[in-house]
Image (cartoon, rainbow, N blue to C red):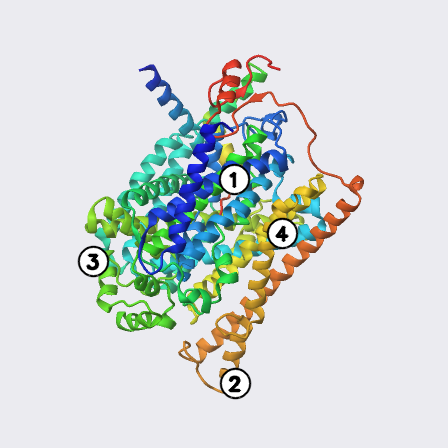
Amino acid sequence: MSRVRAALAKARFLVREFSGEAAYDRYVAHARTHDPDARVMTRRAFERARTDAREADPREGFGCC
Amino acid sequence: MSPKSVAVWVLVGLVGALGWGILALSRGEEISAAWLLAAALGSYAIGYRFYARFIADRVLKVDKTRATPAERLDNGVDFHPTDRRVLFGHHFAAVAGAGPLVGPVLAAQMGYLPGTIWIVAGVIFAGAVQDMVTLFFSTRRDGRSLGQMARDEIGPVGGAAALVAVFAIMIILLAVLALVIVNALAHSPWGVFSIGMTIPIALFMGFYLRVLRPGRVTEISVIGVALLLLAIVAGGWVADSSLASTFTLEKETLVLWMVAYGFIASVLPVWMLLAPRDYLSTFMKVGTIALLAIGVVVAMPTLKMPAVTDFAARGDGPVFAGSMFPFVFITIACGALSGFHALVSSGTTPKMIQKETQVRVIGYGAMLTESFVAVMAIIAACIIEPGLFFAVNSPAGVIGTTVQTASQAVTNFGFAISPEFLAQAAKDVQEASLLSRTGGAPTFALGMSEIFSSVVGGAGMKAFWYHFAIMFEALFILTTLDAGTRVGRFMLQDTLGNVHKSFKDVSWKPGVWLASAVVVGGWGYFLWVGIKDPLGGINQLFPLFGIANQLLAAVALAVCTTLLVKSGRLKWAWVTGVPLAWDVAVTLTASWQKVFSEDVKVGFFAQRDKYQTGIDAGKVLPPAKNMGEMHTVVTNATVDGVLSALFAILIVIVLLDAARTCLKAAGSPETVRLSEVPWSESKIIAPAGLIATPEERAELAAAGLDSGGGRAKEPVA
């Protein structure tokens, strides 16, 4: 049972990483490792900033033919 | 190596060799696609296990003690060490698109063998090597782009030529991809409706992610894919209803829509259309390719196309003109060797890679996977009736516009097919006609619907699977149009910024609009020309696209070779040097023939002369139907010829500049200045391959880490 649960957790982790859903958690965790009381953006603000960054340099994330 | 692994690898080798043997020795009889898969997969396994490992360990000397940019510059956003399995998925999704589905289909006119050999040999010795070596060098330079590396390591002239090349390629690439979609959607109310619906679906997803539930990508992607499937089903209802005529569009109308879409999409904010479309197409891409792999294995279809057709030697094929060498090797770019990948390998991926040792699985491995997609495309094209293949892929100027003329013309090629068969094939997938649907997408969709309907749903599902496949290709081609226009615009703004400062500001609206209009105008021009050309747009433009893509590969391989030489790996320079020499030989021969060939089917200027002479004599030469079309041929042939020559000149400039740098570096190694970031120690422990080896597992366990790896909990020596 615990192995099934571990496998599901792993799958969930991989899907969240792949889709980019985990980006916010990672950002918060990263900010907190340096300063536990760091002020972090809200999820809404973070996601906006992340999408808008592509506006500035569209080469990031451009795929192939 | 242990005796067990020796035995396993001998077995893998035997399976691959058996596959190749059957492919090569079958004469006349139809063989199962299983042999093609065995040959390809066996070769990939050997290539990955031995050659890629040799390059990683001996040539590049990947260093597991050296920190990657992701580790050193970790900011939790764009630089961050990413699980290798996730990054493999990202990298694969970024490099694979419509390319590997289009080229191999067109190349099938020469039979399945030439294309398959090039796809498999090309990827092992050239394409995957290029991706991996570029990824490695970019990782050692904090993720510098190919253009920057060309400028830093080769010199300003080579760098500038590389920049011009990238821009020109972007324009041609976008035009050809758009042409593929226009050819698939013309007179197809089902297709137009379901592709059209992707726009409101994407807008809804964008709104959801921006306003309703920011960042919940997985759930909205699932909703989006469900809506997409609904749109495909609904397309069938629309095609049967009184609305059908509203969605039955001419090519000209579709081009105008496409150009308008390209412009508007690229000036809208990213969150509205581009970001959600990206999620949708990634989901569809990974899902459909997995389905297709399962479908091919379960259905195990039979290859109906001959191994090698007469067109291979004669070079007068209707799909694209020219003989096997060099034209198979430029027609199949993505899947064997694609210069475009160097842009991905030198952009985002190096900023996310956990360990240097992982360049093998991500650079080489993801490219092998793309190559496998190309092999499936060639299978899809070769399992349908060859007569149908040629009726779908020949321009109307060659086969006429009715099933009777097409049947006759194709039967004359040596592939007997009845008018009734052609009519029935169109009816099966609920299209008015399948004739001259050039560009590869419809052929691929026919093959895919053949495979899927034999596994799920039977003949009744053919129409659904056909439109599913068209949707699948159209989705990422439209995403590429948007994203590619943005990239072209960015490059243009960057260059214009040297003339007028305001252009550098990417949020300055007049600059954005102007640059977007120029880029859209560029590919829109070639797209318009492509549908109007009496000689057939794909026939004329695809070689140009192939030359351009292989030109970019030459730039990437030249950068790699220069870097190998400059970094003291002169004796290993052949690893990228030989593929470079091959690529240059192919590209320059193709450009040479396109410019100078006396054969009017191949040489652009020979075409120009023939039709100009006709105009001067007041004669209309077929397939042109009037004087207007005669002038169209002359103009197009001139533009295409000049571009072929331009590409050849660019490649020579880059090569000369690279050779100069290499000679200087080899002659006086003490003068070499590398812009490599100095070594610093890596604290991350992570396996090199997708699956951890026993030693790696022990190392992870000792550091208290799971299979994903990470920073050691306590310092380990």
The total of numbered circles placed on residues is: 4
Front residue (pair B44, B516): B44
Q: Earlier in the sequence, mark 2 or mark 1?
A: 1
Kindly indicate whether the residues beneath marks 4 and 3 are on one polypeptide chain. Answer: yes
**Residue B420 image offset from top left, x and y in percent:** 21, 66
Numbered circle sitting on residue B242: 3
Q: State which mark lies toward you, 1 or 4.
A: 1
Q: Nearer the viewer, mark 2 or mark 1?
A: 1
Q: Earlier in the sequence, mark 4 or mark 3?
A: 4
Sequence-wise first label, 2 or 4: 4
Q: Do we see residue B143 in this rendering?
A: no
CA distance separating discs 2 and 1: 55 Å
The image position of residue A65, as x and y in percent, is: 47, 50
Q: Chain of mark 2?
A: B
Point out which mark residue B163 bears: 4
Tell us which disc is closer to us: 3 or 1: 1
- In this picture, residue B469 sits left or right of residue B152: left
Circle 1: residue type: Tyr
The residue that disc 2 covers is B616
Element type at mark 2: helix
Q: Quadrant of the C terminus of chain B?
A: top right
Q: For mark 1, what is the residue?
A: B364
Label 3 SS: helix
Q: Residues within 10 Å of mark 1 (few under 14, many from 20)?
A: many
Question: Which comes before the other along the chain, label 1 or label 4?
Answer: 4
Query: Are labels 1 and 4 on one chain?
Result: yes
Q: Nearer the viewer, mark 2 or mark 3?
A: 2
Task: Tell me where residue A5 appears, x and y as whole percent.
Answer: 34, 18
Residue drawn 62% across and 38% down? Answer: B138
